[in-house]
Amino acid sequence: MLTALIMAGCAGQYVSHETGGSQVSNAGRYSMDQDRGPSQTLTADEISEVTPRVEPRSRQGNASPYTVNGRQYQVLASADRYSEEGLASWYGAKFHGHTTSNGEVFDMYQISAAHKSLPLPTWVRVTNLDNGLSIVARVNDRGPFHPGRVIDMSYAAAVKLDFVHKGTARVRVEALAGQELDQPVYYVQLGAFSQRQSAQNLRDQIARQIDDDVNISEGEFYRVRIGPVQYDRAEALQRALTTPELGKPLLVVPN
């Protein structure tokens, strides 16, 4: 996995933590020699499910071909109709807090996955063929590069699929598409104020800049929100409206 991998020099060249790498030394990147689960274990009931959604390709992690320890890998042009069976493994504390292939931060307590060839991100359904358990996971990392393994699951995902103690499991991996990918609506929250007038001033300022609905949600605080809008628009507004004064707006799912 590219938590497991780091970019080396030019695009498409990677260094794998799993075998020591060949282009650039990976020594010292991780504080642990061997991976393990967290000191405080989780039960399946304590782990939140994830909701699949339509997303654009990540700017990082999709270079193709790329090389790991002398072997070249191709990233698929599309995940459409992808289905494969094989061994799944899992990764945890050693990589917790480090960057994944697409530039996000790996959190072993959340459901995610690593794959050698699927575009990043891709939403997949992973079914444990030994016990019938199935979950949806978001692929945001590269790997595994051990022979015979088709996917690496986060610690949380392995708990959900009940193979965390066994280490590996026979699985089916299927890419989600069409109606299986929800397009949930979001609010872009610009700020929360104790005084309504402060919220109204910001609301009026932003409303002059964009065509989307800008409203004030009343409660303990007066929250200035844009929306609801679909994910792609919410993400674009979040980027456009991030300022030193306001900070980065929050993406909020309606109750």
Image: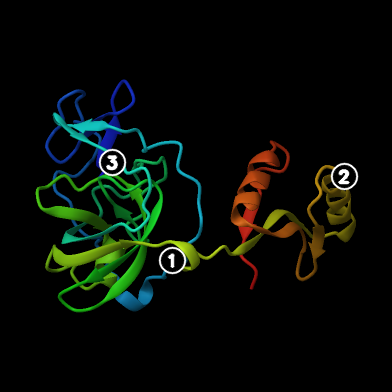
Considering only vertical position in the picture, is 33 above or below 133? above
Q: Which residue is mark 1?
A: 50
Q: Is residue 96 visible?
A: yes
Amino acid type for the residue under numbered disc 3: Leu
Question: How far across and down, in percent of the image, does residue 95 sit?
Answer: 27, 47
Question: Which mark identifies residue 2?
Answer: 3
Relative side of 53 to 41, left or right: right
Q: Nearer the viewer, residue 100 or 69?
A: 69
Q: Which residue is mark 2?
A: 208
Determine whether the residue tagged by mark 3 lies in a helix, strand or loop. Answer: loop
Q: Is residue 91 visible?
A: no
Question: How far across and down, in percent of the image, does residue 238 sit?
Answer: 65, 46
Task: First in sequence, mark 2 or 3: give its number.
Answer: 3
| Quarter of the image with the N terminus in it | top left
Q: What residue do we see at 31% from left, 40% from top?
A: 75
Task: First in sequence, mark 1 or 2: give its number.
Answer: 1
- Image quadrant where residue 72 sits: top left
Q: What residue do we see at 80% from left, 57% from top?
A: 213
Amino acid type for the residue under numbered disc 2: Arg
